[in-house]
Image: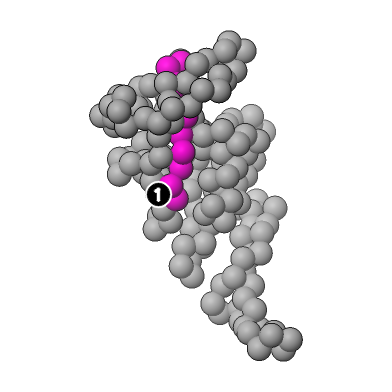
């Protein structure tokens, strides 16, 4: 799996527009699987900096559009009810029970030097995760994730970076 993204040393002229086109590829190889016992069915769980704090057990959900923050993290970040904005759409949890959100909050999520503002829906429900980031977060940092390799790869400046799952 790979994705092409601009990279400074791969400049090629674009004669139609007089611009320089840039190419780089983020990819996964067998070397990326070395530390992982195969086969596996583990979720891609990472550590991220959310709201300026190091947060463990964040699920990277490639198939979801919903970004979730669970109550334990909300309390751990010392957030208050007045920090939330109204959110009135019920959610269905992993256990198929309907969950009424407490509200929504926008917080910066940082990986390396990349920072993206994320609108988390705050829920009071049990989860082995502290938060869930979705495909919109991956798209915002122009990242490629692989559950097979338990990694997220992205470019930061001119450097290929990776976020290793736990």
Q: Which residue is the extreme one toward the left?
A: 78
Q: Position of residue 45 (x, y in %)?
A: 50, 35
> How many dots with numbers?
1
Mark 1 neighbour class, 10 Å CA radius: few under 14, some 14 to 19, many 20 or more: some
Secondary element type, mark 1: strand
Identify the image quadrant of residue 80: top left
Residue drawn where x is 46% and y is 62% of the image: 156
Q: Is residue 148 left or right of residue 81?
A: right
Left or right: 122 with respect to 151? left
Q: Residue at x 44, y 50 (%)?
A: 116
Residue 48 sits above or below residue 103 on the image: below
Q: Is residue 120 above or below residue 117?
A: above
Q: Is residue 130 visible?
A: yes
Q: Is residue 18 above or below residue 127?
A: below
Where does the magenta region start and end?
116-125
The spot of residue 59 in percent (x, y) is: 51, 33
Residue occupied by mark 1 = 110
Residue 69 visible here: no
The colour scheme applied to this rendered structure is one colour
Residue at 62%, 76% (x, y): give it.
22
Out of 65 and 39, give the one closest to the viewer.
65
The question of residue 138 being in magenta is answered with no
In the image, residue 99 above or below residue 6: above
Q: Position of residue 3 (x, y in %)?
A: 66, 59
Q: Position of residue 50 (x, y in %)?
A: 37, 41
Give left or right: position of 17 versus 60.
right
| Residue 3 horizontal side relative to residue 89, left or right | right
Query: Residue 121: within the magenta?
Result: yes
Residue shown at 74%/86% (left/top)?
16
**Most frequent secondary structure within the magenta stretch:** strand
């Amino acid at each position: 799996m790979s994705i092409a993204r601009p990279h400074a040393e791969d400049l090629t002229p674009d004669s139609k527009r007089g611009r320089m086109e840039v190419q780089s590829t983020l990819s996964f190889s067998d070397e990326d699987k070395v530390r992982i016992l195969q086969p596996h069915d583990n979720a891609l769980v990472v550590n991220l900096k959310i709201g300026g704090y190091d947060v463990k057990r964040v699920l990277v959900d490639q198939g979801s559009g919903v970004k979730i923050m669970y109550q334990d993290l909300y309390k751990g970040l010392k957030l208050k009810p007045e920090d939330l904005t109204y959110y009135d759409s019920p959610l269905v949890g992993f256990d198929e029970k309907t969950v009424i959100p407490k509200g929504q909050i926008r917080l910066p999520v940082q990986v390396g030097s990349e920072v993206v503002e994320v609108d988390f829906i705050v829920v009071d429900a049990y989860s082995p995760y502290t938060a869930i980031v979705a495909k919109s977060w991956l798209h915002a940092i122009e990242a490629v994730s692989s559950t097979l390799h338990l990694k997220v790869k992205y470019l930061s400046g001119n450097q290929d970076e990776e976020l290793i799952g736990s």
